[in-house]
Image: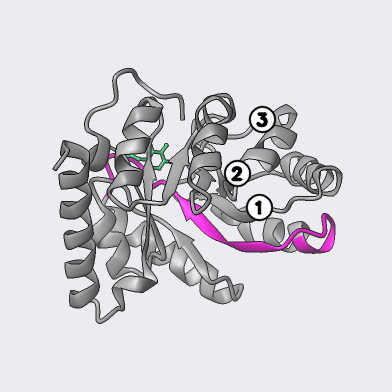
């Protein structure tokens, strides 16, 4: 077994155990394997081990890596999880099945336009800056309700759910609980929360998608922009 296959098996076992503790069906949690900065060969190894859902944070890297992999593996699904510039909206809509980082009106307008032009509609998640950190992407807490309404009413977008990245030093649980409450309030089914260090806590709070990189692929060869 390759190291990646062994890591995947270990992460899946921990997800199953976290689901058991939370009285949840393991099938209700999707593992997004975050392959940013790792080569296509690493993704191939994960595919060979049965993993089909991947996450990348840069459009350019996703465009370089994924179209050939997708041609060979039709079941592959790609999530874009990084901050997205409006001038990359068209490429993002072309390459992604899910865009998890919708966080401002200009991007909502650009994505709506790109979806019309491309005739392709990835699922959209609104990223919430649950820690209201000035340097971090995501809608501030106080603006989340209004932004969710604007996505629907002004931009004609269907939002499938919410995503967050809690502050590094904080206990993530209250952030996950807040995001789950906000999703329930808006009737949104998808909750992308939890990374290598905290995905079990996220599952306890209702995550439907956990984004796990390091615990599957190992330390990243160079720092990724976020
Ligand atoms: C890199 C990244 C992850 C994965 O982080 P790990 O700690 O390596 O599991 C998850 N979500 C986002 C948005 C990321 O940029």
In contact (CB < 8 Å): disc 2 and disc 3: no
Q: Secondary structure at mark 3?
A: loop
Residue 122, numbered label: 1
Report whether 17 appears left or right of 103.
Answer: left
**Is residue 134 something that shows in the picture?**
no
Distance between the Cα atoms at labels 1 and 2? 6 Å
Label 3 environment density (alpha carbons within 10 Å; few <14, some 14–19, many ≥20): few
Mark 2 closeness class: few <14, some 14–19, many ≥20 residues within 10 Å: many
Residue 51 is covered by the magenta coloring? no
Spatial CA distance of label 3 from label 1 is: 16 Å
Whole-number angstrom distance, CA of label 2 to CA of label 3 = 14 Å
The residue closer to the viewer here, 27 or 58, is: 27
Quadrant for ligand 1 reads top left
Residue in the image at 57% along x and 34% along y: 67
Check the image and name the residue furthest to the top: 222
Which mark identifies residue 222?
A: none
The reply to whether the C-beta atoms of the residues labelled 1 and 2 are less than 8 Å apart is: yes
State which tag comes first along the sequence, 3 or 1.
Answer: 3
Q: Is residue 70 left or right of residue 222?
A: right
User: Which residue: 77% across, 63% down?
Assistant: 152
- Residue 33 seen anywhere in this rendered image of the structure: yes
Q: Position of residue 208 (x, y in %)?
A: 41, 65
Kindly indicate the quadrant of the structure image that contains residue 86.
top right
Disc 2: which residue: 96
Residue 85, which numbered label?
3
């Amino acid at each position: 077994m390759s190291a990646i296959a062994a890591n995947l098996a270990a992460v899946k076992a921990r997800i199953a155990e976290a689901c058991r503790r939370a009285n949840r069906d393991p099938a209700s949690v999707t593992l997004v394997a975050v392959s940013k900065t790792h080569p296509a060969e690493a993704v191939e190894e994960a595919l060979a081990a049965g993993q089909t859902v991947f996450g990348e944070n840069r459009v350019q890297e996703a465009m370089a890596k994924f179209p050939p992999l997708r041609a060979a593996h039709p079941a592959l699904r790609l999530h874009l999880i990084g901050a997205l510039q409006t001038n990359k909206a068209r490429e993002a809509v072309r390459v992604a099945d899910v865009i998890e980082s919708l966080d401002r009106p200009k991007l909502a307008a650009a994505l709506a336009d790109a979806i019309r032009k491309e005739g392709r509609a990835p699922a959209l998640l609104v990223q919430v800056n649950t820690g209201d950190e000035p340097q971090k992407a995501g809608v501030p807490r106080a603006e989340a309700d209004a932004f969710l309404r604007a996505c629907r009413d002004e931009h004609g977008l269907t939002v499938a759910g919410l995503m967050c990245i809690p502050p590094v030093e904080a206990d993530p649980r209250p952030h996950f609980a807040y995001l789950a409450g906000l999703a329930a309030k808006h009737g949104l089914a998808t909750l992308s929360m939890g990374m290598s260090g905290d995905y079990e806590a996220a599952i306890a709070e209702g995550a439907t998608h956990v984004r796990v990189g390091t615990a599957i692929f190992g330390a990243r060869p160079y720092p990724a922009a976020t």
